[in-house]
Image: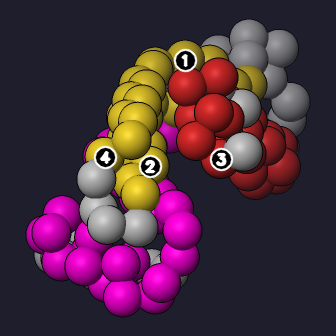
Amino acid sequence: MNVPYTDSHEEVLGKLKNRGADLLIIFTLIEWHGDGYAKNTDVNYEVSFKVFDNEGQLLVEKTDGKEGHIIGPDKPKNVWDQLKAELPKFFKEQMEGFFNDPDVMKHLE
């Protein structure tokens, strides 16, 4: 479920609790942006991933943040097409990393 960025943590958690799920997950994009340069295309991000029980008790929290190249230094001529292809893969890898983390997995089983 998407929520407005203006919602507080408590409001988001309340909305999730009202859905009646066994586990509640809040994934927050704190920062996410990319920059294209002559030699590299970078992505800079900071994210938070929290898993709660159905009462709203925090079970596990993971955060990650990096600055790094997703394309380059052998950048193709049409970097924007490549970026459109690579950025979703990069995002998917980050999400899979959270869900496959051993601390998270033990609560999802």
Return the residue nearer the eye: 65 or 104: 104
Residue position for label 4: 58
Comparing labels 3 and 1, the label whose residue is closer to the camera: 3
Whichever of callouts 2 and 4 sits on the residue coming sooner in the sequence is 2
Residue position for label 2: 51
Q: Give the residue at x 29% y 62%.
A: 56
Whichever of callouts 3 and 1 sits on the residue coming sooner in the sequence is 1
Q: Return the mark for residue 68.
A: 1
The amino acid sitting under disc 3 is Leu
Q: Give the residue at x 74% y 11%.
A: 73
Q: Residues within 10 Å of mark 4 (few under 14, many from 20)?
A: few
The amino acid sitting under disc 1 is Gly
Percent x, y for residue 34? 50, 39
CA distance separating discs 2 and 4: 6 Å
Residue contact at pointers 2 and 3, CB within 8 angstroms:
yes
CA distance separating discs 4 and 3: 13 Å
Q: Residues within 10 Å of mark 1 (few under 14, many from 20)?
A: few
Q: Return the mark for residue 108.
A: 3
CA distance separating discs 2 and 3: 9 Å
The amino acid sitting under disc 4 is Leu
Q: Secondary structure at mark 2?
A: strand
CA distance separating discs 1 and 4: 30 Å
